[in-house]
Image (cartoon, helix red, strand yellow):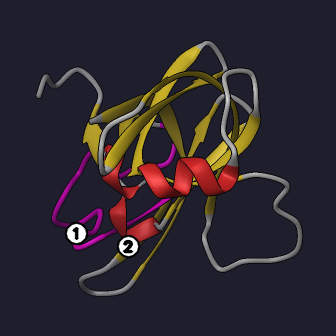
């Protein structure tokens, strides 16, 4: 599970759903949650949280340009690739932290990924979870 520390900067919600923006370094992650500040008091602007997302939910792109609907786009550098028969694990250096993606080995080959490549990691907002700072998994 990828985990990054951040601070809540904005919350937009209705009765049951929230879009929560979290500053991590110079980037903003957005999480779409089935909870609100009324049901989860840790959801407050200024609070520290841990942003979490599964490795299998991280797509990778090289030379991406234009607009896309994915809200979470972070730039990283490939620091390690562990090739498997069907799936491969790609570790990225993201601001001194590791973000891991598990994608098909075919995708690694199609993107011609090698250590040192600059890529963008993409994660849909509904695949991002938040945990109140100070809580362990």
Residue 113: x %, y % from top left: 66, 39
The residue tagged 2 is 18
Q: Is residue 67 above or below residue 132?
A: below
Q: Relative to 17, is 97 on the left or the right?
A: right
Q: Which residue is mark 1?
A: 35
Q: Earlier in the sequence, mark 2 or mark 1?
A: 2
Question: Is residue 69 visible from the viewing direction of this image?
Answer: yes
Instruction: Establish if 54 lies above or below 114.
Output: below
Q: Which residues are magenta?
A: 30-46
Instruction: Using residue 111 as the reference point, say whether residue 24 is left or right of it.
Output: left
Q: Nearer the viewer, residue 43 or 55?
A: 55
Q: Are marks 2 and 1 in contact (CB under 8 Å)?
A: yes
Label 1 secondary element = loop
Using the rendered view, name the quadrant where residue 77 is placed. Answer: top right
Q: Would you say residue 39 sits in the magenta stretch?
A: yes
Q: Is residue 120 left or right of residue 49?
A: right
**For this rendering, which residue is in front, 136 or 74?**
74
- Picture residue at 38% right of the left edge, 40% below the top: 88
* Crowd rating for badge 1 (residues with CA inside 10 Å; few <14, some 14–19, many 20+): some
Quarter assignment of residue 117: top right
Residue 46, given in percent of the width and then of the height, sits at 51, 38
């Amino acid at each position: 599970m990828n985990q990054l520390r951040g601070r809540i900067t904005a919350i937009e919600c209705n009765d049951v759903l929230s879009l929560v923006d979290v500053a991590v370094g110079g980037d903003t992650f957005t999480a779409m949650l089935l909870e609100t500040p009324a049901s989860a008091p840790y959801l407050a602007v200024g609070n520290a949280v841990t942003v979490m997302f599964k490795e299998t939910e991280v797509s990778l792109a090289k030379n991406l340009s234009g607009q896309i609907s994915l809200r979470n786009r972070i730039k990283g550098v490939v620091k390690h690739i562990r090739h498997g028969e069907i799936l491969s694990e790609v570790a990225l250096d993201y601001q001194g932290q590791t973000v891991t993606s598990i994608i098909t080995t075919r995708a690694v080959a199609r993107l011609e990924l090698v250590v040192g490549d600059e890529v963008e990691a993409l994660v849909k907002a509904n695949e991002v979870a938040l945990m109140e700072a100070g809580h362990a998994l």
